[in-house]
Amino acid sequence: MNKVMAGVCVAATLVSASVQAEESAYYAGLTLGRSRTGSPTPDMILSQSNDTVGGVLGGYQFDNNWALEAFYTEAGKFAGQNAAGSVTGNGKADVWGADVMAMLPMSGAFSLYGKLGLASIRVRVNTAPASTLSGDTRTASSYGLGGMYNFNPAFGMRLGWERYGALPTGGSGGAKDDYNINVYSLAAVLKF
């Protein structure tokens, strides 16, 4: 009877360890950082282009080198006026997306990473006088670089940079102007 109980305990331990190993491939995290926006129109002079931003992420790590990740992040606020001073405006951007991450383990618990993906960037804009610049949504590639340190198998921190392309609609002709948003962030990541 004791041998049977010992066998059941050993089998339960092995199954539990196997399940925990599989479960640790999933992860979720919170980000906090700063954004820096480019000018949303060629003649806009920005008085505010930095903002504190936050976000969430979740993903699946296939092995030590590859992961697939979905995310949401605030991409910051901007404010400014045109060169003539006749139009003032402010705006806010949010980003939803998915990335493929390539990781390069360095030494011990430290890794470098690069990410490439697809993101939907929504820009909301208010201007005076009204209707001179309006928000828009753009789907475009996103990319980033960073480093991560795993304190233990279940918890790690990342320091990274991501870049997104945004697209407000502007002017009386409805011209579309590309501009970039850079987000520098620190993320706490929990594996489960």
Image (cartoon, rainbow, N blue to C red):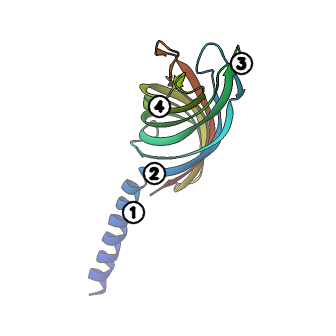
Q: Assign a secondary structure to mark 4.
A: strand
Q: CA distance from mark 1 to mark 3?
A: 65 Å
Q: Earlier in the sequence, mark 1 or mark 3?
A: 1
Identify the residue position indicated by label 2 in the image: 27
Q: Which mark is residue 17?
A: 1
Q: Secondary structure at mark 2?
A: strand
Could you tell me if the residues under marks 4 and 3 are in contact, i.e. CB atoms within 8 Å? Answer: no
Give the residue at the far bottom of this rendering: 1
Vertical placement of 45 versus 51: above or below? Answer: above
What is the quadrant of the C terminus in the image? Answer: bottom left
Front position in the image: 29 or 153? 29
Q: Earlier in the sequence, mark 4 or mark 3?
A: 3
Circles 4 and 2: CB atoms closer than 8 Å: no
Task: Measure how far apart labels 1 and 2 are at the Cα level.
Answer: 17 Å
Query: In the image shown, does 68 or 127 lie closer to the viewer?
Result: 127
In this rendering, the label closer to the viewer, 4 or 3: 3
Where is residue 147 shown, x and y percent of the image? 61, 37
The residue shown at (30%, 75%) is 7
Q: Sort mark 1 into few (<14), some (14-19) or many (20+) by Cα contacts within 10 Å.
A: few
The amino acid on which the numbered mark 1 sits, given as a three-letter code, is: Ala
Label drawn at residue 85 = 3
User: Which quadrant would residue 182 be assigned to in this image?
Assistant: top right
Q: Secondary structure at mark 1?
A: helix
Considering only order in the chain, which callout, 2 or 1, is on the residue closer to the N terminus? 1
Q: Spatial distance from mark 4 to mark 3, Cα to Cα? A: 27 Å
Question: For mark 4, what is the residue?
Answer: 121
- Label 4 is placed on what type of residue? Ile
- x, y percent for residue 125: 55, 31
Which residue is drawn at the image coordinates 48% and 16% (left, top)? 176
